[in-house]
Image (cartoon, coloured by chain):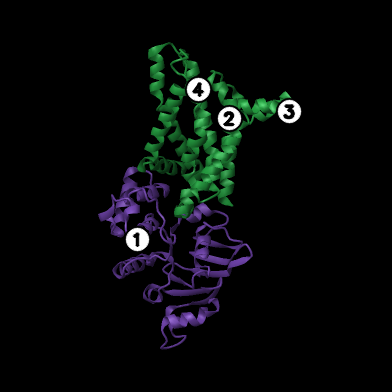
């Protein structure tokens, strides 16, 4: 497992060797903060809370995380470096984990760079720090689950566009299952327990608890098991 | 050093490699010849553990590639066809990454390996250039440098002189020749003169089967006075 480190390091620094990292960071921060101010009514709500900021994360991640994840394996397959990587003394699992953790660390940096929002909040009022911390933790965990899905779809094709579309589609399904509008429509035809069951497979359902300051083990288990499962499939897809 | 035992590879219903066996001892430079699509690259990919064989196996330094691929990869230097490398990295960064994966983790050991390899392959002048900006000849040398970095007992080179000018070809050949005394080398090529110049053995494969396994001198004496490519054509014409 010690072979994870060099792969992780190369991949993480790789983001900053190309414009990808800077473009992504700027777009992510502008979009997430912009949504909070202009659509979420961050000021108008007159509350010392970041709810209007975090509530858009599941939707924002839907497009931005596939943009980060699509290149993970597709790029290696397209340029042929996958042959180089897998003839170095690295197991498939180590390579998958190294790349995943690098991308996850990069996303964590992006999420944490929204810290001026926290400073604004602290300056203007008295936020509940527990809720702020759990929201950040939830957002980072959710980013990992999204990334697991994207890493998997990326391993299935050498075409980045196909990889992007597939991952958006897969994430969209996982998002929709818990979207209140969709659940409302579903309730007309299905009993409540069935709707709850469906909603349990969604990012939104599990993320919402975090934004309210509730850290429930079952939500953590959901994100971590989804991440683990997609990474397992990722290894299988690459060894195929 | 390298023992190939009845390797078979099927792609769908097509048999790309059909029961190939040979051994390469220390000090040998094996020239691997054959028309395009005859199964040269596939055979090399199976020996390096990148492609898993349908049947049969290969032993490298006593390690079975189907049982313990990582042990095989450790004692192997491999230059894949068209020398893939991470284009956004500089030559130095790339070799440092290879050194880390190869287990040279301390800064001193890593820098020493990188410096030695840069000197050996005459890459010092481009050490801070990103690989994607290099000419084909330099890229090829970066790939070669990468395979030599850990001074492996076994070298597998897929068309190492492809894309080089005549001077560079000569240089790479003499480098391989100098290194070969304490190594087992397999190199594939389309240049028959290259085989005569440096190889101690010739294997020609055609339609996935070994049709010739002998010394260059024996190969030449098959049709005294004929040009090498004429002999080659007679032997592999069934492929056309």
Q: Going from the N terminus, do you reach mark 4 or mark 2 first? A: 4
Secondary structure of the residue carrying numbered label 3: loop
Mark 2–mark 3 distance (CA, rounded to whole Å): 21 Å
Disc assigned to residue A190: 3
Chain in green, by letter, is A
* Closer-to-camera residue (A126/B110): A126
Which one is in front in this view, the residue at disc 3 or the one at disc 4?
Answer: 3
Subunit of label 1: B
Disc assigned to residue B136: 1
Q: Position of residue A20 (x, y in %)?
A: 39, 41
Which one is in front in this view, the residue at disc 3 or the one at disc 1?
Answer: 3
Query: How many other residues sit within 10 Å of disc 4, few (<14), some (14-19) or many (≥20)?
Result: many
Q: Which residue is rendered at x = 60% and y = 34% of the image?
A: A174
Residue A192 visible in the shown view: yes
Q: Are marks 3 and 1 on the same chain?
A: no
Mark 1–mark 2 distance (CA, rounded to whole Å): 47 Å
Q: Are marks 2 and 3 on the same chain?
A: yes
Q: Position of residue A7 (x, y in %)?
A: 44, 44
Q: Are marks 4 and 1 on the same chain?
A: no
Residue assigned mark 2: A203
Subunit of label 2: A
Q: Colour of chain B?
A: purple
Looking at the image, residue B61 lies above or below residue A85: below
* Closer-to-camera residue (A28/A21): A28
Q: Are marks 3 and 4 in contact (CB under 8 Å)?
A: no
Mark 4–mark 2 distance (CA, rounded to whole Å): 14 Å
Disc assigned to residue A135: 4
The image quarter containing residue A187 is top right
Q: Are marks 3 and 4 on the same chain?
A: yes
């Amino acid at each position: 497992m010690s072979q994870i480190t060099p792969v992780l390091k190369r991949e993480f620094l790789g983001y900053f060797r190309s414009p990808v990292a800077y473009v992504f960071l700027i777009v992510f921060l502008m979009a997430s903060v912009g949504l909070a101010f202009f659509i979420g009514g961050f000021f108008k709500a007159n509350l010392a809370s970041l709810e209007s900021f975090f509530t858009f994360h599941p939707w924002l991640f839907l497009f931005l995380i596939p943009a980060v994840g699509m290149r993970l394996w597709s790029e290696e397959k397209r340029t042929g470096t996958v042959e180089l990587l897998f003839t170095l003394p690295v197991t498939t699992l180590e390579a998958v984990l190294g790349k995943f953790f690098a991308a996850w660390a990069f996303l964590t940096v992006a999420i944490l760079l929204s810290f001026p929002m926290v400073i604004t909040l602290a300056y203007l009022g008295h936020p509940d720090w527990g809720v702020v911390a759990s929201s950040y933790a939830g957002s980072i965990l959710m980013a990992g689950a999204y990334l697991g899905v994207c890493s998997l779809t990326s391993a299935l094709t050498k075409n980045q566009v196909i990889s992007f579309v597939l991952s958006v589609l897969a994430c969209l399904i996982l998002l929709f299952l818990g979207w209140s509008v969709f659940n409302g429509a579903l309730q007309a035809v299905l009993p409540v327990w069935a709707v709850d069951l469906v909603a349990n497979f969604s990012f939104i359902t599990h993320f919402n608890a975090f934004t309210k300051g509730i850290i429930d083990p079952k939500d953590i288990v959901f994100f971590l098991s989804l991440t683990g499962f997609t990474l397992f499939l990722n290894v299988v897809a690459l060894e195929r | 050093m390298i023992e190939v035992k009845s390797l078979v590879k099927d792609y769908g219903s097509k048999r790309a490699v059909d029961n190939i066996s040979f051994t390469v001892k220390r000090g040998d430079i094996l020239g691997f010849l054959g028309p395009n699509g005859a199964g040269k690259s596939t055979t090399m990919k199976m020996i390096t553990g990148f492609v898993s064989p349908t049947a049969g196996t290969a032993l490298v330094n006593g390690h079975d590639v189907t049982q313990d691929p990582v042990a095989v990869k450790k004692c192997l230097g491999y230059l894949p066809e068209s020398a893939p490398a991470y284009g956004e990295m500089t030559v130095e960064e790339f070799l440092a990454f290879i050194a880390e994966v190869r287990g040279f983790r301390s800064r001193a050991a890593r820098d020493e390996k990188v410096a030695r390899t840069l000197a050996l392959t005459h890459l010092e002048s481009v050490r801070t250039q990103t690989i994607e900006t290099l000419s084909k000849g330099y890229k090829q040398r970066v790939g070669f440098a990468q395979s030599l970095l850990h001074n492996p007992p076994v070298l597998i080179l897929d068309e190492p002189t492809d894309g080089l000018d005549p001077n560079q070809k000569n240089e790479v050949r003499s480098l391989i020749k100098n290194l070969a005394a304490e190594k087992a080398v397999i190199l594939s090529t389309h240049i028959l003169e290259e085989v005569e110049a440096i190889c101690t053995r010739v294997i020609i494969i055609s339609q996935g089967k070994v049709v010739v396994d002998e010394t260059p001198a024996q190969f030449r004496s098959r049709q005294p006075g004929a040009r090498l490519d004429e002999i080659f054509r007679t032997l592999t014409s069934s492929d056309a």
